[in-house]
Image (cartoon, rainbow, N blue to C red):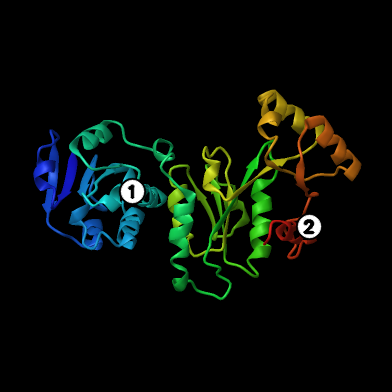
Amino acid sequence: MNVMVVNKYKEMLMGLDIEVMKSIEGVFNVDEIIDTFSNFYYDKMILDITAIRDYQNFDNLQKLAMNINMENVILLLDDNPESDSKSYLSKLISIGIYNFTRNINGINYLLVHPHTYKDVVNIHNLSDLEASMSSNDSNASGDSYSGKLRIIGFKNMTNHAGATSLIYMLRKILSETKSVAAIEVNKVDFVYFNDKELVSTTTADLPKELMKKQLCDVVFVDLNDYPDVDICSTVFYLIEPSTIMLNKMLKKNRYVLEKLANEKVILNKCVLSSEDIATFEYETKLKVYHSLPPLDERQSDIAEIRKFLSKIGL
């Protein structure tokens, strides 16, 4: 059974051929909507955006997205041209709202085929996300906030190439001078560091988690199998260059070296000499961006990590 929150578009929504067990009409504060439906079981909520008081203030939509499962909500947008702009829709996607439309046909479609991030990724524009975050710099706490978020992704190409531990070390040292967050997607390895500031999330919720980190200078993301690397400002691809790991990588995907040809490749947990790295580059036709030796994440100060941070401008 479904629920409705209606206002300006009541007549349109009442024409839907669906079963509705609860409907409220009028203009409501976000807190009122949350209190009414947060513990209320329903299949789908059809939400008329004009029923949200001060809905033009994006903070209200963000608060709603953080307290109600937006996977079950279909947002009916108003007839304001701004709400049909790519910039506006990109902001909705950034806070985890993927099911939005401006007409009955769209609602009927989304009732049967709800969107995931993959369905709206072509609309999502990282520059819009960064611009909206920059506009909030006056609310930032601390003198180190720069007003522009850098999202830096890491992706293991060989098994256990060390992205999780590397991000942990990078965040620990960079936190001395900047506001830094760390997120892993589709796994929960961060829990073993016993650090509550490390966030584990899912593919669907990553944009929402990034929005929560809008006052940070840098967010490090362990991407794993996340499909849209363009959500990051920069992506580093980690390879542990031992014979067994390289052969496993190539057996899994024999075209992987071609796909990495123009990417930033890091040799992590690397014990190769400079001559060996030159041979690796010649044989794989890859350009190594940086190499890192095996490191002890328990150390409070790691020179190799500081060197890498300096190289990437942090």
Q: Residue at x 23, y 43 (%)?
A: 102
The image shows residue 197 at horizontal and vertical percentages of 54, 61
Q: Residue at x 30, y 47 (%)?
A: 84
Q: Is residue 263 shown above or below 109?
A: below
Q: Secondary structure at mark 2?
A: helix
- Which tag, 2 or 1, sits closer to the chain's start? 1
Question: Which residue is labeled 1 in the image?
Answer: 85
Q: Quadrant of the N terminus?
A: top left
Relative to the observer, which residue lies in front, 192 or 129? 129
Furthest residue toward bottom: 143
From the top left corner, tell me how far across and down residue 171 is, in percent: 64, 60
Q: Is residue 51 left or right of residue 246?
A: left
Q: Amino acid at mark 2?
A: Glu
Q: Which quadrant of the view contains residue 74?
A: top left
Label 2 belongs to which residue?
304
Q: Position of residue 229 (x, y in %)?
A: 55, 42
User: How many neighbours does mark 2 have within 10 angstroms: few (below 14), some (14-19), or many (20 or more)?
Assistant: some
Q: Amino acid at mark 1?
A: Ser
